[in-house]
Amino acid sequence: MIAARIPREDALGARVLTVDPRAHTVGERTVPQLVELLTERDLLVVNDAATVPASLRARAQAVSYEFEVRLAGAPHPDDEALLDAVLFGPGDWRTPTEHRAPAPPLARGDLLTFHRAGVSHAFAATVHAVDATSPRLLTLRFDRTHAPLYRALYALGVPVQYSHLARPLAVWDVQTAYGARPWAVEAPSAGLPLRFRVLDALRARGVRVAAITHAAGLSSTGDPALDARLPLPERFDVQAATGALVCETRARGGRVVAVGTSTARALEGALRVVRSLDALALGVQGVTDLRLGAHTPRAVVDGLFTGLHEPTASHYALLQSFVPKGLLDRAYAHAEARGFLAHEFGDASLVLAA
Amino acid sequence: MVLDLSHAGALVTGASRGLGRALAEALVQRGARVVLVARDANTLGPVVEQLRARGGTAHAIVADVTDKDAVYGIVAAAEAAAGPLDVLVHNASALGPVPLRPLLDTDCEALEQVLATNLVGPFRISKVVAGAMAVRGRGLIAHISSDASVEGYPTWGPYGASKAAHDQLARVWDAELAPHGVRYVSLDPGEMRTQMHADAVPDADPRALADPRDVAEKIVTVLSHAHALAPSARLSAAELTRFARAHRVATETEYPA
């Protein structure tokens, strides 16, 4: 499938590949037609994380060149000065990730400073920990937290992006219409087509809409061993009001449709923390290491609205938790043949049993 | 449903002095987690320190709300500090050049600058904050207005026009957001003893002006009971006083001291 190379002018122009895992059918719709596919008994859950400009230019003592640091998630819940990050070598997104120059070797205690030409918010972090298996995966302790940290990040950082794109992204290119809490380091891109014309129409139809917050992480590091571990553990927050709506929806036989794999992960991950669906109504926060796959039982999410991505191991595995492989292969072949666009600014898919 | 401010995240612009500062203090006093935004670190810093010294949850963001490139960072920083925002108060305002002058003496650039601060800047911030409120199904945005938006006061052209424009946007915002459980209201605080008023009317009699802290108390009562306001509500200073009085009594009845 061809990747969309720039954000759409009209987000609502995305096509939707519909997959019904019960009827074993594949079809096509438009985003506005989502209104016809959901009813007043259903609940659409979105990820309201804002996308942080998580790519930073960094320097370190004993490293003679400037290199790139990409944040991998939200602050650690127990210590908000700590954030995980992945190191990249010199260069930037224009080079395919797997061809990037090696990252510098850093050790616990090393000091990193972050800069951007023409910007006065320079800030710093020390290496708190280096992953035992992957030396590019670090935990950094920043020299500030909360508002001052995010002011600095937004002043110096640029959005994480990949070489399939035709131009540098601006921070507004990677935001959903409803994102606010700065937890995502890549756009929860399934939500990009869901502008308020669609959300308003869904509400008018009686479809309930609710939000969780999930720290959608990096989708690629260029290192096969590290990529095999994605998604890494990610912070989530299922607010009590959303948990209550989830319980109510399932109780009356409606469908819980997750917008994006990050939302599915948050909801299923939350249930594994509290063990019972009813307890979701009290709200759950934490960090989940759940990786959904073909054999993962799902107890919360019935349907998934997501983008069309390279069938990488983790994304395809997650989809197989909703759709048998044979049907999934058929759906992707259909999308390819019909010229659907892939990746974060591409078309969408809706996996939902009628 | 009464908005429980003791569990609310709130963002107040123009919060280093005057009504903005008083609103931030009144919200902090009720237990809200408040983010104060202003351009001048030297004025804002001590205000936030004082609130924290009294045990309140307050955070400072030094920023210019008219800077397009800063908007996402301001909201992200506010949410990082105070969690999801339940209340946004558009209080920061530009008067335009002082002394105030007739429209015939007003440069078009001055009008554009006032509109940038009082209308377009707040619009950008509202967009980011209201979207999140809408999918959470709750939230409140308040525009601090002025009767210069409804009366034809000589020399108050740019300011009055910008407030009138924001009043009108607020009416449309309210109509669009109400189905999502979010309200957008305009409130005229009346004339107050503030630096802004002194800049505009240097020879005003301070005894005729309200204390911004008293006005802030009224506004915070209104914010708590905003669900009871009519659709696309804009309260004049007199209506604000009456509404606050009626609902303060109601609150005291529900929660006796």
Image (tube, rainbow, N blue to C red):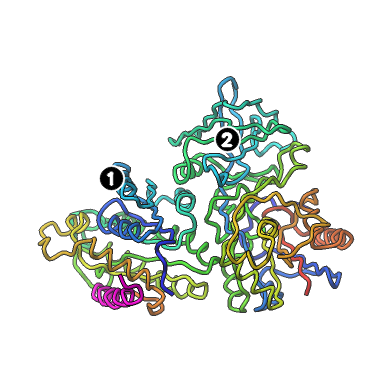
Which is nearer the eye, B83 or B29? Answer: B29
Q: Quadrant of residue B220?
A: bottom left
> What is the three-letter code of the residue carrying label 2?
Leu
Tell me if residue B244 is in the magenta stretch.
Answer: yes
The chain to which mark 1 is attached is B
Position of residue B234 measured from the top left corner of the image (x, y, whole percent): 33, 74
Q: Quadrant of residue A20?
A: bottom right
Q: Disc number at residue B114?
A: none
Q: CA distance from mark 2 to mark 1?
A: 32 Å
Does label 1 lie on the same chain as label 2? no
Tell me if residue A290 is in the magenta stretch.
Answer: no
Residue pictured at 49% horizontal, 44% vertical: A150
Which is nearer the eye, B174 or A241? Answer: A241
| Position of residue B4 in the picture relative to residue A183 (left or right) | left
Residue at the disc numbered 2: A140
| Position of residue A267 in the picture relative to residue A51 (left or right) | right
Q: How many marks?
A: 2
Q: Which residues are magenta?
A: B235-257
Residue pictured at 61% horizontal, 54% vertical: A236
Closest to the camera, between mark 2 and mark 1, is 2
